[in-house]
Image (tube, grey):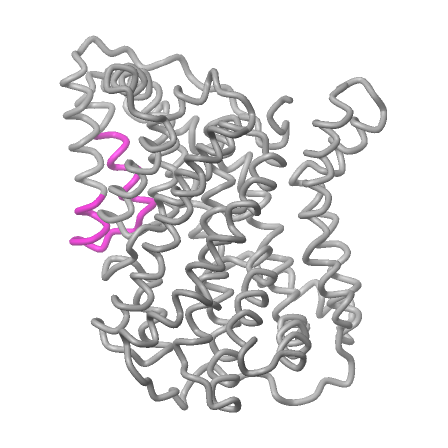
Amino acid sequence: MTPSPTLAVLAAAPPALPHTGSDTQLLIAVLLSIGAIVLLITKLKLHPFLALTLGSGLLAAVAGAPFDKLLSSFSAGFGSTVAGVGLLIGLGAMLGKLLADSGGANIIADTVLSRSGPKALPWAMALIAAVLGLPLFFEVGVVLLIPIVLLVARRGNVPLMRIGIPALAGLSVLHGLVPPHPGPLVAVDALKADLGVTLALGLLIAVPTLIIAGPLFARVAERWVGPLEIPEAATPVETAKREHTPSFGAVLATILLPVVLMLGKALADVVIDDPKALPQRVFDFIGSPLIALLAATLLGMVTLGRAAGFDKARISDTVGKSLGPIAGIVFIVGAGGGFKQTLIDVGVGNAVSEWSSKWHISALLLGWLIAVLIRLATGSATVATITAAGIVAPLAADMSSTHAALLVLAIGAGSLFLSHVNDAGFWLVKEYFGMSVGQTLKSWSAMETVISVVAIALIMPLSLVI
């Protein structure tokens, strides 16, 4: 199997930056650059794009690159990452905006909740979050889901933690482990993994992880946090009945279309395994992430936009407004790609490869540990994923497609570890649920840690089997 051509590097990378220093000098360069990025983001509150740009220059300078070449690798990495991932982020944002504005999210929630009894509510919320989490960014999913969680808790007289944790777990697991979310996409690109295989294995790991970190852990979090008052002031749920609404089946089909197409490509690669065969060429085309997401977005304009009564101008306006909020995400991801390319070009990846062979440490565990450390330091799952992928990229060169995909998942799992006060998601959850810092640490932070540990605990033995 070959890596997805859509995520191949589209800009030619420059020749590796000349480096004559020792491995010790490289280690110092990495530690100083990551330390600088952490301080700039956490202490000086500098935007991550600027912090990653400055950190890349510092990395190249300390590693011994010529002055006029300090940011050449960064520029090439930025361009190739945005070319490979930026389009997909944009299409995902369009689909998510159509889902939100058409009322499709509420249709999914209302349908599932109307068929769930009190005991099944935590499982229903986990299912809703997982389905909505496929096309939505984490922050968008939180804004859409939390009001639904508060409304269900109030109406059903159910403890807030019992259904809140499953909902948050569903969004977080998908965000960290399953493409087309930005972190997994960038890791797939950096490690040259097969997107379809990564998606299939990501879903395989995500299901048991969600069960443990969601409905099961919710019982524990409920005891740790204690009773919570349900905040009255929250983003209002759309209560007014629309004259036109999308059907449940149409909404579900639109959300699942890109997943089905990408999984179909992965299955064709295994079953047919002949690049010249017409059926595989067709599956390779329609199952590429760009075409799959483009198809879902175009379909969503009809099944979501037109079905909700939107005219052409309203659909165009909805799609257009979706792009503004993601500009920051695209620039951060691109800057992370630049930092990753600088790490590779100064020789950090090769040094890590040599160290790991000497220490006899699993590449999967190494990727997870590096992502954990960067996550704890920066608070950003995306920055942790991008940086860790850049550091361990050479280890994936000789891996099979399944093990490269598992390395992507290991890094994604590490990037979710222990969200705390330097993570914007921490404060978003705290404010929406009206919790104290201590209660947020006992619930949200603990849940993120459970996700990370359970996922790597499933990935490691799976790597021995497949």
To which quarter of the image does residue 56 belong?
top left
Residue 253 at x, y percent in the picture:
75, 59
To which quarter of the image does residue 275 belong?
top right
State which quarter of the image contains the N terminus: top right
Residue farthest to the top? Answer: 20
Residue at the spot 16% in from the left edge and 33% down from the top edge: 32
Residue at the spot 30% in from the left edge and 16% down from the top edge: 357
Magenta segment, prevailing SS (helix, strand or loop): helix
Residue 47 shows in this picture? yes
Residue 270 at x, y percent in the picture:
70, 27
Residue at the spot 49% in from the left edge and 55% down from the top edge: 326
* 412 on left or right of 360: right
Vertical order, 243 against 277 (above or below): below
* 21 on left or right of 98: left
Residue 69 shows in this picture? no
To which quarter of the image does residue 57 belong?
top left
Residue farthest to the right? Answer: 278
Residue 223 at x, y percent in the picture:
30, 76
Residue at the spot 51% in from the left edge and 65% down from the top edge: 141
Q: Is 449 covered by the magenta stretch?
A: no
* 349 on left or right of 33: right
Highlighted magenta segment, given as a residue range: 38-58
Residue 27 at x, y percent in the picture:
18, 24
Vertical order, 452 against 395 (above or below): below
Vertical order, 39 against 428 (above or below): above
